[in-house]
Structure formats: C-alpha cells, structure tokens
Amino acid sequence: MHPIHCFLLLLSLANSLFLQAWSLDYPIATLSSLWTNNNSLPYNASYLDGSTVRAILLQESLGNSEPSFACGFFCNGNCTGFLFAVFTVCGGSNSNITCHNRTGLQVIWSANRDRPVRDNATLQLTGDGDLVLRDFDGAAVWSTNTSGRSVSGIYLTKSGNLVLYDSIGASVWQSFDHPTDSLILGQSLREGQRLTASVSSTNWKRGQFYITILADGLYAFVDASPPQIYYQKRVNVTKAVDSAYSQTAENNTMRVTFTNGNLSISVGPGTKYAGISLPSSSSAQYMRLESDGHLRIYEWDGTWNYLGDVLHVYPDDCAYPMVCGEYGICSKGQCSCPSEISDNSAFFRQVNDRQPNLGCSLVTSLSCESMQDHQLLLLDNVTYFNFMDGWVTDEETCKEACLRNCSCKAAFFQYGENASNGSCYLRTQVFSLMNNQPEVIDHSSSAYLKVQKLGKSTSSKDQLISAISHASLVILVIIFGTILIILRKMKATEMEEEEDFKGAAGMPARFSYKLLKEATNNFCEKLGEGGFGPVYEGQLGNVKIAVKCLSDFSEGKEGFLAEVMTIGSIHHINLVRLIGFCSDKSHRLLVYEHMSNGSLDKWIFRKNRRGALDWKTRCKIITDVAKGLSYLHEECRQKIAHLDIKPGNILLDDNFNAKISDFGLAKLIDRDQSHVMTKIRGTRGYLAPEWLTSSITEKADVYSFGVVVLEIVSGRKNLDSSQPEGSANLFNLLQDKIKEDKLLDIVDSQSSDMQLHGSEAIEVIKLAIWCLQRDSNRRPSMSQVVKVLEGATDSESNLDYESTTAATSLSGKGDIFDGPDSPSAFLTSGR
C-alpha cells in the first residue's frame, strides 16, 4: 500500500475514534459531518473591503515559502453570496488565518460559482459518502455525486487538492479533476476540460473567455456563436503504442500539466511535446484565467505577486478580444471607435466616454426588417484577431454575402497570392479590432463593419409633405396595383427566404432540386417518414445520402429553418451530420449522412426477436444518445433543447453507433434563461409533465431520454395496446414492479443476453427513473447521466418512485388533448 494511503487510513481510524467532525491538526473529516455557514465555524477572517472567510479544513504550511490552503465558505466584498471553495490564506497560526492584505487570499477552486449560497447554508458529508452543498432554505446547490461509492472521509492536501477517499486511502473524487479558472503546480488540464474565466473580479459567474484542451493542443476562445479563437498551441500528435499500458481513452488523452517553468503537453505515456515556457520560481505558484482573457501566473512570497503572462498572444495585447470592448479599435494600448462620419453623424459612439476600453456601440441598431438600409463601412489599416473558418472567394462576393445575411455583423477579407481571390471571414459578433502592424502581420486584409444607413433630419413642413406624398402613393398603388402587389410580395417573400441561406459562413452545402432529384433516382427508394415529410435514399458521387423532403409547408418551413441553422452550426459524433440543403422555390430538402442501420425503433420494437440487440449494443446506444444531448445542452453557446427525443429520431450506422436526428422542433435557450415559454411540441408518450405549463427547460429532453432508456431496456413501446391487459402502459407496469421489487421483470424477457445482464440493466432502469422525476429540478443533467453510464459516478439514490405516474397525463391515457387545446393546436410531431 502507498504510504499516503496508509497515512490516510490511520488518520481516518483515529478520527472515527477520537476527533470531532473537523480537526485543526489534520485537515480531514469523516462521514456524517455537517458544517453551517455562520460564525460558529472555527476559523474566521474578515477584511476591510467586507470579504469574509469561514474555513472548515485548514492545511497549514510549514514555512513562509508556501501558502496555507483552506476549504470552506468565502464571500467577496459585500457578502451577499458565498462560494464553497478551496483558497489560499496567509499565516501559519492555528488561531489566525487573516492575511495582512487581500492579495494573499485567492480562490483556486469553487463548487458553486454560478449559484452562490447565503448565510446559514450547509455543507454535509453524508453517511453514504456524498458531499452536498445546500442553501439556507435547504435547496440542493451542488454535490460530488459520490453516494454509495465507499467514501470514508474528506481530506485537504498540501497542494490544495480537496479529496474524497475510500477505506484504503484511494481517491474517489478530487477537486483537481474539476478545475474552474485556476491551476496549481502539479495540476493537469485534460482533453475536454476547461478553465473558464469569471465575468469580473467581483462577479464569479462564468464569463466569455475559456481555455480548453482539444485533440491537437491548447486553445483559448472568446464565447460567441460560433466561439472565436484568440490563441492556439497546436502539436503534431502521434500517439505511441506502449505495451506496458492498455491503450484506453485515458492513456491516449491530450493533457497539459502545470510544472515549475513549463506548461507541458503530453498524450498518454511517453509522448511529450514542446510546451509553453513559464517563469520559474523557488516558491509556490498558481495560474488563473482572468476576466480579460489573460492567463496569468503568480508566485508566493508571503502574498501573491504577478510573475508573467502564459499566453503570448500575437502581436501584442491588442490581439485580446475584449481589450477595447466590442467594436473598439486598439492601437498601441489606446482605444477608439470607428470614426467615419455620414451626414454630420457618426455611426459609432463610446459606451462610456470616460472609459474607452469598454468599447463602442452602434448609434443606429441594425434591423433585419430594413436590410435594404444596411451598408458596409470600410476601415482603413484595421485588422482582426481571428482569421479562422474562412472560405475562398473574391472581395465583392465576400461583402455581398455579409449584406445578404442579417446575422453577419462584419466581413474580413484576407488577400491571397492571387489578387482577385482571398479568404472571406464573416462574423456574427464583433469584438475588439486592432490597427494593422506591417512589421508584425505578414498579410494584408480589409475590414468591413455593417452599419445602418443614417436617416436625414427634416423640418415639420418637409415631414408633412413627405407624409402626404407617401399616402397618395399608397392610395394609387392600392387602387391600380392590388393584384400586382400581392404577386410581388409573394415573390419577394420567396426571394427573402432564398437569401436567408446565401453566403453564411459555416453553412452546409447548398444543392439544386434537380441535382437531388437525380441523386435519389426521382425519389424512388423511401427510407421512412417523419412528421415533416418522407426521407429517401440517394447517392452523390460515392457518398450515400438520406434526403428529407418537407411536405407540410406551414410547419415545414419552421422546421427547415431550425434544422439548417441549428445542425449547420454544430458538430458532434453523436449528432447526424447535415451535409447540405436545398431551398429551390417551393422545394425544401435536407441532405443528411446515410445511416445504414436506420432508426432505433426498428431494432427495439421488431417482431423478429432473433435479431434483437444485445446488452452491450443497447448500452452503447444509450451512452451515445446521452453524449449527444449533453453536447446540445451544455457545450453549445446557447443551450439547444431537441424536444423530440424518441427511438424514431435516433439513427444507427454500420457499427450501431447512435446519432440524434430531426431538429425540426429544436428550441434555443440562452444561458441566462431559466426556462422558455412555448406551445407543446414533441411526440405523445415522450412529453415531460411540465409541458402542461408550457414552461420548458432542457430537462424536457432528459425526461424523454428516460422514456427511451426504458424502451431500450424493455424492448417494447411505452404505450403498446398489443401488450396483455394491464401492461399496455409501461409506466404503470414500472410502478407495479417497483412496489413488488421486481424490476428485472421490466428487462426484455425475449433476450437471453439481456436477462444474463439483468443486474446491470436494473441499474440503468434506476437511471431512467432519475430522469423521469416529476420535478424537473430533480432530474440529472445529461453530463451527469454520461458520468453514471461511464461508471464515473452513481445514480441518485434518493428518488421519488411515485413520480413516474406523472407520465400518464401526457402519454395519451388522460384527456389532456381533448380540451380546447386539442392536438391540432399543438406543434406535435404526431409520430
């Protein structure tokens, strides 16, 4: 056994016999410990600015060359809200953790940055091993989700890592695996993890800047739609095969590790790459991603002092996205606004005249209803920090593409070797610009900002004459051209719809109707039919495709726009790839990658049970769907609620990899929105109970996912009139089996492989029940679901097993669809 494991085991035994729930000499606590956020906690410190520290565990340093670490409650400034956090404190005294100034107090990890708690909030290490944070009113705010994982206690290491350990001292959960905005010496950031800056030094919520590790290196982004890169450290990855290690995903994961003098990059065992050189120091260090996008490193000499920048963003600080705010132009550290004047009026003004670094705003906001008044303002000798995701064209086409797309706010054209062509970059959000520096930047470019044409001021007399003239013209047009106006309006509407898709960066390919008609052999081989129209098999060159034809124009247009704009901008291995689209007069078609094994419902509801899916395949499908939903809910700039998750919308490829399809009913939810109001959309039997109120969050997808999981495990539909009497409703059957403690009866009885893995299937059913909780707040996030499926955590054990009865009200059993809001009034897929 490792010495530290022996130490922790002995310490845990000592605590259980002699110590209280906290210990000054040993920063450790045992099960069933409870702490309340008030002055009753043993270690308290206050500062002149009103900040307060209430420490629970304290890891004291042995000398002045290292800081002391503590975990507990921390508030900043006026103390209206507290973080549960790990932070550094000054002094090595048991009785005094107060620093002489605030620079010695720094938060290096926090659990609830987006949801601070108040006085008298509680933190509890429960008897079954879950560390739970609750607000003063008892509402659950955060937990480690380690219930039932043999946790013995909690320990704070000398490096500031908060660890939940088991009976042999092994780590079950640690804060180092869940970084917020900082890294400590020895800590790694792994592929897929992020450091996310706070909004400001006084606002802890997640801000615009984040750093993440992708498969080929380290990247820094400013959040936008899509995110814009302002720094990248790429490596040429060649993953070595080492027989001494099993080639698991963990062993082949890209990671960066903070060491003294270096931010090292590695992939698996023995594959290190040139990292980022850092200032070295003989004392402790930490780095933090600041609210301005800088990744700064600090060293300890009794307080924290700035040591240097980690990201050397080229060419200087002007290349940081928000150094001069939105639309601000940075030149040698000075900020200004675009200065072109029209009719004695400026297009831009400073947000705050006394603080130019806060950026600029448009004097006249852009309006999509008056796109004819949009124009592009050329900025001389100005460039941008981000030249990614461009497309090759000529400068005029680039400008026209921006003018035709209302969401485009700026066009940047980078000249190529051929003077007639170059790269076009369209941006839907404009961050700081910067003056071109020929001695640093080796390419020439043009910058165009979209502005609204400024109207001329007129006298009252001129306005009256103009109004009379316009009224007369309207009357004449009504009298002599009613029919012509209607025809032209119809034509204009059609053209406007066509223009919606022209020139938008990142959009999928556009095909003509004639080409798709040939590719599908005149739409002869039908793959299936959804709520918006049939799907046909086709072939473009050597690539097999699936073409969805939207036949219901009234709803199909909305679904068409949703799918093109939503799927065209997101990419994930568990989402069906949208290859292209067709908007040709009245024809609306979507071109997808072909999924050879069709939809999931054909495999789990099939009559021929000899081809039934085995347990391993069903598990993989469930995990794939969970990962796809997790991406939509948590990794896109706006949360995307699919709102029609069901087996018919889950497609399978050659290897039974599952991908989510059909985004016709998808709803975008801003990150600062708690919910959205919308009319019912989806499919009977998969609708969450909260649809009764039309107040929806992404948790509606979690509920539908729970229904699908039950269907996959049981091999039957949740509403099936062909089942024996009393078993037609799967929810009612589940309720009965829960009471009888016979959940194994839910598992597909016609599959011997499923019965062989009955105990594992029961655990997945419990996960489904967690997803089906009547109270949407009690359902897990999809990232939690993924962790459960991958074995990183366990399902919630404290479940309301009566909650699944709520499904009957929206599953077709009740009369919810029989009143004035009948099915015809709802946007349901009816499939």
Image (tube, helix red, strand yellow):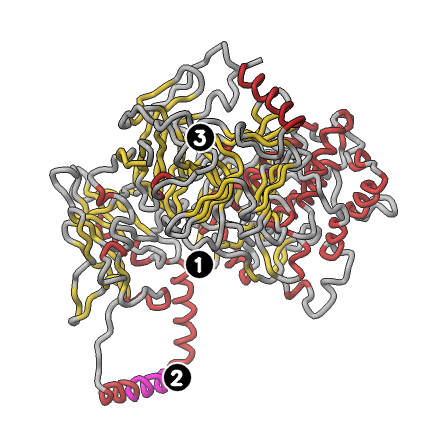
Residue 471 falls inside the magenta stretch: yes
Q: Which residue is mark 3?
A: 191
Q: Which residues are magenta?
A: 468-477
The CA span between labels 1 and 3 is 45 Å
Q: Pick out the residue farthest to the top.
A: 243
The CA span between labels 2 and 1 is 27 Å
- State the residue in front, 727 or 589: 727
- State the residue in front, 310 or 440: 310
Kind of residue indicated by mark 1: Lys
- State the residue in front, 72 or 410: 72
Disc 1, SS: loop
Residue 752 drawn at (x, y percent): 78, 26
Residue 259 in sight from this viewpoint: yes
- 10 lies left or right of 319: right
Residue 561 drawn at (x, y percent): 47, 55
Kind of residue indicated by mark 3: Glu
Kind of residue indicated by mark 2: Ile
Is 397 situated above or below 603? below
Q: Earlier in the sequence, mark 1 or mark 3?
A: 3
Q: Residues within 10 Å of mark 3 (few under 14, many from 20)?
A: many
Q: Which residue is mark 2?
A: 478
Q: Which residue is mark 1?
A: 585
Identified at 22% across, 37% down, the residue is 314
